[in-house]
Image (cartoon, grey):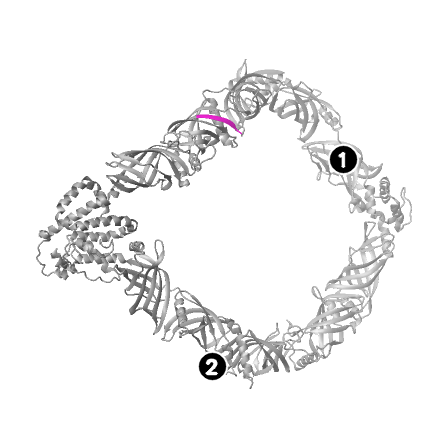
């Protein structure tokens, strides 16, 4: 080994270089270090080497043997337990405690309090593969039983003994469930699966070979499951009766086989039984103890009622199979288990719910149910296609039955397949039916049902036999036949409707025959004509026949011959004949041609006359197309009586007098015909004479084929109008009216008086003088209508009637036919009334009191007329004018008037107020008349009419004439009739100039008024035309005054005369003087525009001396001045600041109203404050703009000195201070406008001498809201006196004033301490919130140093600081601003940044003697200036296993200082970390050693230098700093390097190298085993150390003895020890060391360890070196 110690430094350096596989350095690298390799003796030829190796090997063997015996026995015991197995031979779960330690087979002990948590388990188990030694097993903890990773519960197991590799456990113990959910899942799987796996885990002590070891048990045990109970048999089945709870009682005897070795006491179990997925009902059993093998269980319960049809179909199949002896596979599914019979156990119930038993159910033999059948009535339905397969119905089938069950039932439906036949013919036909409803009596065994719509299929060889069957059935009174077959029934049971199939039938039955329908007479109830062909009438005959049979036959269409008096008249068809049992009402269709025979014609004639006739019908060979019935119906013969028609065809008549009947004598009549038949009637020709009491009324002779009378079937229809020639002789009409009035009982005096007035004299008339009292409430129209309401006439007619295509002539005579009249009967009144009414009109007098014209156009106007008409007769009347009245003036027709109606009173006449339409027919004449009306005092109208209508006594007389003359007053030129009350010039006029509005009063002296849409005049001042004026909607009422608004314009004047007139007009108005004007008519217009004829008239009108009023006095033109923008530049002068404004508003109160625009102003303004003159502003002539909509004049000025008066400096100072600190200030403005340039639409001119004296409010700065906002912060530099912080700040200027104030400075305060100035340079403060650049000097003083440090530290830790900046006397050098700025105080918040200065660190190089280590910290600098850390004091806090404690501390001056560049990152050099109380926190420290990184909290105080020499203390805390832990790797690397340099023996060096690679994994377990290992290892190491010297000499013998003592045990544990101790070969150790050294060299930053002492100088053994180590365990071993 000395050779190794004498390797040159170059050799030592080479040790770190790459090696080949044999351990030599790569050849190219070797050449670099060895020019001449030395020749050395091989180390293994050195005798000293072998002696040392032998001694070391003996010591190592001794230590290993002692470790195996004393340390590794627990490991060997654990290995044996791991390889052993457990087999559960049997296990039974019970819920009562065992008696005398033995589990009960029956649950006759009290049950446990809560079976959900606890039960008792009796278990017999076999332990296998337990090793060759006998051992006692003592379970030191409850065994945790788990399933699929979930703990189910815990159970205590008794001690056991194993020998020869096996043992047993037989015990009954309480099992405590710890996870109900998991245990429930396990229970389900135990019952359902073929096997399951338990995991049993716990601790136990093993005592063997006089040694005791504590080991862990963790075994998977596979146990057979119950597999869902595949073998279940039903040994008995009974349905004894109805269940009180509903459904059917059921009892099942079962044998259940349990294949599992686990049993469980279930107690009372509940199951659901089912069949093919249908739930049948619940069953239960009590005292069930489920054991291994067969278990006999009787289940009692009920079959529940079913409502789902699919479920009932399935159950029907079950019952049908049972009746037929066919097995059915049923199921029983677990519901719950209650070991005590009452309380269900959740996990047991949930598991039991997964149980589903499958079992076959079958009866021992087939069952017989139905014994006999009686059919009752039979229905047969035949068609051509089903002659030998008719549809049958048997409504009353009766059968006898019996049921072998004890529960109640009712058979509700039956289906069957049966054959019909006779003894002579054998089976004739097969009858099959679907389900039909049935009723049953279970006690009597009687079943009633019906065959419904079932085909009776005749066998092909039995057609003849079936023909005979039908004939016999039709003709016989009683007929017998055989019925055979089978049936299927549906039964109503307590569980629902159940179907049973294939029940046999075999019986004989009989039916009553039809007797050819002659058992009673056939009756014809009525006849109906339904249509006609060219040859026949088509009729429906309603007959009643009687069928005495019990058979109903549907025979289709049956045809019979129609006969009368032995003459065939036609063919009768019985359509779709159905002969029901008993009375049959049948409608037969007949074809009848009455014109073919005399008998037929007489039959039709007598029928219409209402007489009865005898008729008959008889069958023949082709009476039916149904072959099987032809023989039967060919022999039918019936007779009956046909009754005559009872109703009349003509029901009434109607008379319609036409509007021209008086002129043409032609009226219209119609008849109402009642058609008794279904077929329609068409009458194409009518000839008739109409009379009243023998007096001719009219005659009819009309071919109406083009518009025939059409009467629908079974309908009553009024015919179209038929022309009738009336007898209109006036006397005849008067007589007809009076006769009907008298017969109607009406008062005839009014009509007699009217006839007298008309000069009539008729039979029965009373001649009376007219008096208004006779006509009170008398209505001539109503009188006439009432008189003719009861009109009856006599008719004699011959008509051509068509029914379908059949035509015939009918002769009809009807007397007293009711004849309807309507209001048209009043058209006959004018025959006598016209002359009377005309004479009344001629005598009447017409006058007008006023006439008002409106809505005038060139073609006419509306006229409102007030007047009266008198002398209108003894009765009230409405006079109407269907045609316009003609109006004439001076013999010239000027127009036509469309007049409304006028109502008159009896003997009085009428006063009217009406509106009429006047049509101008001659505009020239109308213009002349209108001018005459305007200028003259009166005029006359001549009015005529040729078509006047008078409505009197509720009748209108037309074609009357009228002629009248009317006088009215005129307007007389309107002299002195016009007054201007006021006027206004409100706006510019769209047509140019200024709009003019006149409020006037006009007095109209005429009876004629006018309403015009427009009336135009031209206004004049002297000879100057000022412009037009016009009124709209002008209303000049007759003989009255009207207020009229006139609108026009002052048109633009360009001439000097015109401008002078305009100026005079304004002068007079402003001077409140009247101006005399004259107006000339220019136009008149109506709703459609100018009226030419009226305009022409108005242009002839001139009105003079109309006075225009002047304006009010003392007008104020400028009531207010508002300054909206102002600029002061105080840098130009403290008391004569430069001032400007681009927005001064003067409220101009325009006295005229029209837009007057001021385009320029020149003025002088005196400014006052607090009532004292303060300054003068004298702007030159300045442009101005005027918003004419608001009257606002806007002006401004630029760079005018705000000249403060001498002696007013202090007043100005206070004014500025008030504006700076207050919300507003008021100034007085007294101005004198020497020139105001005005521009109007009528012309431009100057206004002068306008003054104002107003107060104006200026919005103040209001201390800028007392707040400021810091938008951004940048620490940009530092001087030895302060830190430079550049700020972007915002504050609000609420004023509209902009001020320029130069450089200012504010003091900055935090917590009442001034921490430095804030500077703003070249400051101009504009309105609103603006951003400004500021420079803050964070300046410590003796009083503020700590506060400054607090601010700087807090800024880096995201803290917020409430700052206040305040003005002072030194804030500005401008005198007029000093007091104002000194009062400024603004609050703001400085918000720090979340700097996270420390981004990480590394800890390494642990010194165990001083418990210090080196740490390297990485810091990022968020500032725009570098800073250096000169010294640091810090505490490092750590969250340990059980507490939060101070892990370490730092107190170090850094030389050179640790500098971090601006916006950069830097890592410090080694900083010493002092661990705090390492022994107190040893466990935590050991845990830390195994971690690659830890997270700590750091609190520090650092002395820093910022920028160019600013020194301060930085207090800083940061949580969650991640520190990389390289303590252990660095220590092991150093240790390995030291041992290598000391030339350790190769095997020891290998152990150290292996320890280095394994220590990371081992260190994690140190904490948990440190107690036990320390005591055991301490004793072993002590023994080894004390015996080391002697052991050297006796090593060989000791090794032999140890080897002999260990024996086979060493062989058994070789694999286990091999797994626990890392293996490194001698040749691998250097390579591993080199790699570790290389890794250590590459780590950053880790200081290089000092070289170890030369191992050649150490003459002691390695063991001696170990015992002298002063490092704590386990580091002394390393």
**Between discs 2 and 1, the one toward the N terminus:** 1
Report crowding for label 2: few under 14, some 14 to 19, many 20 or more residues within 10 A (C-alpha). some
Q: Which residues are magenta?
A: 246-253
Q: Residue 244 appears in which quarter of the rendering? A: top right
In front of the other: 323 or 551 = 323
Query: Given this view, does label 2 or label 1 mark the residue nearer the observer?
Result: 2
- Circle 1 residue: 651
- Circle 2 residue: 1373
Task: Answer with left or right where residue 23 lies relative to residue 597.
Answer: left
Dot 1: what SS?
A: strand
Residue 1343 lies in magenta, yes or no?
A: no
Q: Position of residue 1061 (x, y in %)?
A: 68, 80
Q: Position of residue 498 (x, y in %)?
A: 51, 27
The number of numbered discs placed on residues in the rendered structure image is 2
Q: Is residue 1246 visible?
A: no
Q: Is residue 802 visible?
A: yes
Report crowding for label 1: few under 14, some 14 to 19, many 20 or more residues within 10 A (C-alpha). some
Q: On screen, 825 above or below 561?
A: below
Q: Which mark is residue 140?
A: none
What is the magenta segment's predominant secondary structure?
A: strand
């Amino acid at each position: 080994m000395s050779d190794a110690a004498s390797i040159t430094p170059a050799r030592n350096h080479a040790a770190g270089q790459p090696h080949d596989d044999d351990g030599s350095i790569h050849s190219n690298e070797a050449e670099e270090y060895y020019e001449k390799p030395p020749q050395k003796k091989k180390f293994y030829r050195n005798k000293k080497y072998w002696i040392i190796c032998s001694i070391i090997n003996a010591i190592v063997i001794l230590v290993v043997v002692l470790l195996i015996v004393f340390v590794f026995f627990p490991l060997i015991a654990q290995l044996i337990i791991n390889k052993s197995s457990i087999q559960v031979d049997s296990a039974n779960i019970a819920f009562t405690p065992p008696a005398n330690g033995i589990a009960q087979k029956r649950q006759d002990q009290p049950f446990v309090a809560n079976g959900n948590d606890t039960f008792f388990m009796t278990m017999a188990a076999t332990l296998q593969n337990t090793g060759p030694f006998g051992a006692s097993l003592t379970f030191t903890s409850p065994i945790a039983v788990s399933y699929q990773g979930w703990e189910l519960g815990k159970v205590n197991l008794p001690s056991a003994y194993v020998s020869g590799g096996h043992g047993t456990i037989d015990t009954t113990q309480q099992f405590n469930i710890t996870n109900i959910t998991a245990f429930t899942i396990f229970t389900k799987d135990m019952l359902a699966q073929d096997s399951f796996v338990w995991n049993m885990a716990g601790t136990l002590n093993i005592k063997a070979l006089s040694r005791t070891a504590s080991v862990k048990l963790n075994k998977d045990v596979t146990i057979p499951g119950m597999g869902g109970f595949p073998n279940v048999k039903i040994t008995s089945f009974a349905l004894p009766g109805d269940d009180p709870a509903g459904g059917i009682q059921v009892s099942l005897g079962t044998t259940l086989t349990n294949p599992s070795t686990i049993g469980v006491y279930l107690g009372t179990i509940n199951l659901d039984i089912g069949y093919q997925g249908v739930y049948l009902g619940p069953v239960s059993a009590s005292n069930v103890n489920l054991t291994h093998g067969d278990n006999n269980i009787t289940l009692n319960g009920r079959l529940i009622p079913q409502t789902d049809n699919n479920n009932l179909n399935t159950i029907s199949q079950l019952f049908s199979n049972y009746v037929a002896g066919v097995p059915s596979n049923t199921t029983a599914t677990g519901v719950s288990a209650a070991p005590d019979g009452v309380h269900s156990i959740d996990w047991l119930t949930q598991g039991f719910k997964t149980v589903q038993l499958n079992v076959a159910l079958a009866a021992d033999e087939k069952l017989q149910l139905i014994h006999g059948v009686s059919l009752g009535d039979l229905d047969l339905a035949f068609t051509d296609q089903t002659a030998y397969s008719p549809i049958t119905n048997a409504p009353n089938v009766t059968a006898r039955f019996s049921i072998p069950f004890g529960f109640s039932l009712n058979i509700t439906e039956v289906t069957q397949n049966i054959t019909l036949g006779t003894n002579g013919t054998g089976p004739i036909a097969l009858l099959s039916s679907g389900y039909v409803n049935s009723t049953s009596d279970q006690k009597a065994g009687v079943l009633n049902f019906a065959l419904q719509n079932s085909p009776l299929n005749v066998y092909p060889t039995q057609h003849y036999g079936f023909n005979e069957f039908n004939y016999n059935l039709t003709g016989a009174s009683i007929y017998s036949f055989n019925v055979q077959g089978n049936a299927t029934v549906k039964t109503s049971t307590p569980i629902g409707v159940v179907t049973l199939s294939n029940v046999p039938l075999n019986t004989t039955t009989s039916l009553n025959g039809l007797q050819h329908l002659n058992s009673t007479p056939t009756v014809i109830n009525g006849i109906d004509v339904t249509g006609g062909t060219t040859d026949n009438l088509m009729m429906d005959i309603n007959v009643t026949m009687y069928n005495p049979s019990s058979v109903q036959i549907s025979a289709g269409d049956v045809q019979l011959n129609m006969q009368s008096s032995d003459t065939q008249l036609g063919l009768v068809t019985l359509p779709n004949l159905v002969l029901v049992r008993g009375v049959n009402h049948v409608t037969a269709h007949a074809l009848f041609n009455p014109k073919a025979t005399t008998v037929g014609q007489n039959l039709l004639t007598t029928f219409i006359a209402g007489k009865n006739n005898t008729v008959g019908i008889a069958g023949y060979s082709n009476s039916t197309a149904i072959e099987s019935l032809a023989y039967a119906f060919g022999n039918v013969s019936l007779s009956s009586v046909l009754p005559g028609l009872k109703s009349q065809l003509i029901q009434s008549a109607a008379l319609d007098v036409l509007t021209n009947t008086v002129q043409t004598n032609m009226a219209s009549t119609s008849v109402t015909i009642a058609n008794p038949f279904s077929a329609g009637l068409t009458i194409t020709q009518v000839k008739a004479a109409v009379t009243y009491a023998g007096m001719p009324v009219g005659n009819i002779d009309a071919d109406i084929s083009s518009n025939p009378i059409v009467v629908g079937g079974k309908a009553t229809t009024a015919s179209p109008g038929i022309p009738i020639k009336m007898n209109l002789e006036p006397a005849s009409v008067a007589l007809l009216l009076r006769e009907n009035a008298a017969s109607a009982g009406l008062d005839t005096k009014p009509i007699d008086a009217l006839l007298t007035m008309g000069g009539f004299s008729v039979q029965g008339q009373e001649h009376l003088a007219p008096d208004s009292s006779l006509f009170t409430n008398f209505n001539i129209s109503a009188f006439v209508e009432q008189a003719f309401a009861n009109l009856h006439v006599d008719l004699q007619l011959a008509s051509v009637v068509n029914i379908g295509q059949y035509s015939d002539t009918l002769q009809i005579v009807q007397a007293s036919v009711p004849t309807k009249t309507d209001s048209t009967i009043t058209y006959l009144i004018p025959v006598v009334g016209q002359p009377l009414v005309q004479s009344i009109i001629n005598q009447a007098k017409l006058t007008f009191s006023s006439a008002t014209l409106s809505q005038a156009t060139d073609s006419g106007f509306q006229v409102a007329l007030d007047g009266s008409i008198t002398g209108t007769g003894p009765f009230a009347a409405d006079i109407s004018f269907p045609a316009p009245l003609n109006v004439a003036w001076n013999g010239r027709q000027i127009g036509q008037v469309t007049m409304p109606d006028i109502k008159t009173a009896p003997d009085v006449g009428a006063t009217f107020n009406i509106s009429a339409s006047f049509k101008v027919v001659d505009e020239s004449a109308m213009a002349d008349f209108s001018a005459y009306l305007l200028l003259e005092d009166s005029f006359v109208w001549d009015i005529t009419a040729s078509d006047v209508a008078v409505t009197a006594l509720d009748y209108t007389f037309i074609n009357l004439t009228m002629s009248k003359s009317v006088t009215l007053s005129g307007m007389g030129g309107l002299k002195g009739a016009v007054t201007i009350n006021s006027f206004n010039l409100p706006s510019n006029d769209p047509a140019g100039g200024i709009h003019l509005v006149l409020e006037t009063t006009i007095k109209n002296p005429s009876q004629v008024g006018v309403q015009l849409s427009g009336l135009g005049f031209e206004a004049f001042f002297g000879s100057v035309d000022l412009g037009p004026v016009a009124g709209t909607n002008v209303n000049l009422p007759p003989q009255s005054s009207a207020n009229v608004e006139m609108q026009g314009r002052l048109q633009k004047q360009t001439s000097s005369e015109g401008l002078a007139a305009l100026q005079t007009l304004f002068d007079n108005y402003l001077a409140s003087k009247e101006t005399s004007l004259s107006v000339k008519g220019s136009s008149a217009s109506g709703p459609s525009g100018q009226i030419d004829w009226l305009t022409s008239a108005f242009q002839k009108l001139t009105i003079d001396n109309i006075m225009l009023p002047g304006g009010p006095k003392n007008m104020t033109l400028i009531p207010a001045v508002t300054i909206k923008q102002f600029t002061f530049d105080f840098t130009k002068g403290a008391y004569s600041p430069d001032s400007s404004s681009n927005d001064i508003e003067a409220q101009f109160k325009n006295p005229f109203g029209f837009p007057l625009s001021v385009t320029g102003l020149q003025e002088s303004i005196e400014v006052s404050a607090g009532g004292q003159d303060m300054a003068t502003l004298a702007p030159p002539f300045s442009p101005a703009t005027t918003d004419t909509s608001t009257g606002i004049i806007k002006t401004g000025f630029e760079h005018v000195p705000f000249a403060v008066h001498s002696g007013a400096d202090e007043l100005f100072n206070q004014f500025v201070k008030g504006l700076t600190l207050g919300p507003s200030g008021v100034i007085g403005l007294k101005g004198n406008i020497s020139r105001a340039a005005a521009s109007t639409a009528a012309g431009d001119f100057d206004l002068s001498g306008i003054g104002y004296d107003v107060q104006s409010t200026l919005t103040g700065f209001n201390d800028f809201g007392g707040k400021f906002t810091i938008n951004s912060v940048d620490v940009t530099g530092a001087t030895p006196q302060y830190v430079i912080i550049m700020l972007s700040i915002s504050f609000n200027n609420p004023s509209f004033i902009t001020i320029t104030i130069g450089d200012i400075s504010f003091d900055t305060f935090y917590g009442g301490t001034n921490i430095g100035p804030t500077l703003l340079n070249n400051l101009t403060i504009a309105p609103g919130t603006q951003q400004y650049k500021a420079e803050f000097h964070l300046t410590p003083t003796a009083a503020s140093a700590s506060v400054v440090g607090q601010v700087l530290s807090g800024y880096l830790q995201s803290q917020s600081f409430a700052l206040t900046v305040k003005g002072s006397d030194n804030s500005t050098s401008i005198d007029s601003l000093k007091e104002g700025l000194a009062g400024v105080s603004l609050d703001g918040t400085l918000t720090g940044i979340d700097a996270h200065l420390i981004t990480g660190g590394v800890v390494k190089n642990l010194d165990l003697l001083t418990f210090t280590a080196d740490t390297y910290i990485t810091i990022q600098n968020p500032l725009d200036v570098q800073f250096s850390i000169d010294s640091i004091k810090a505490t490092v806090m750590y969250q340990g296993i059980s507490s939060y404690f101070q892990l370490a501390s730092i107190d170090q001056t850094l030389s050179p200082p640790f500098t971090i560049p601006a916006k950069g990152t830097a890592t410090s050099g080694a900083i010493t970390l002092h661990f705090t109380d390492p022994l107190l926190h040893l466990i935590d420290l050991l845990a830390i050693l195994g971690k690659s990184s830890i997270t700590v909290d750091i609190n520090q105080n650092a002395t820093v230098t910022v920028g160019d020499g600013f020194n301060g203390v930085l207090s800083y805390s940061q949580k969650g700093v991640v520190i990389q832990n390289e303590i252990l790797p660095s220590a092991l690397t150093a240790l390995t390097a030291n041992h290598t340099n000391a030339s350790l023996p190769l095997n020891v060096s290998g152990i150290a190298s292996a320890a280095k690679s394994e220590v990371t994994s081992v260190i994690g377990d140190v904490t948990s085993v440190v107690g036990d290992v320390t005591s055991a290892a301490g004793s072993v190491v002590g023994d080894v150390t004390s015996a080391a010297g002697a052991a050297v000499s006796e090593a060989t013998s000791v090794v032999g003895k140890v080897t002999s003592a260990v024996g086979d045990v060493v062989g058994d544990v070789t694999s286990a020890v091999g797994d626990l101790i890392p293996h490194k070969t001698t040749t691998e150790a250097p390579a591993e060391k080199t790699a570790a050294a290389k890794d250590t060299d590459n780590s950053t930053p880790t200081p290089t360890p000092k070289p170890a002492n030369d191992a050649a100088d150490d003459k002691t053994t390695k063991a001696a070196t170990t015992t002298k180590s002063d490092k704590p365990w386990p580091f002394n071993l390393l």
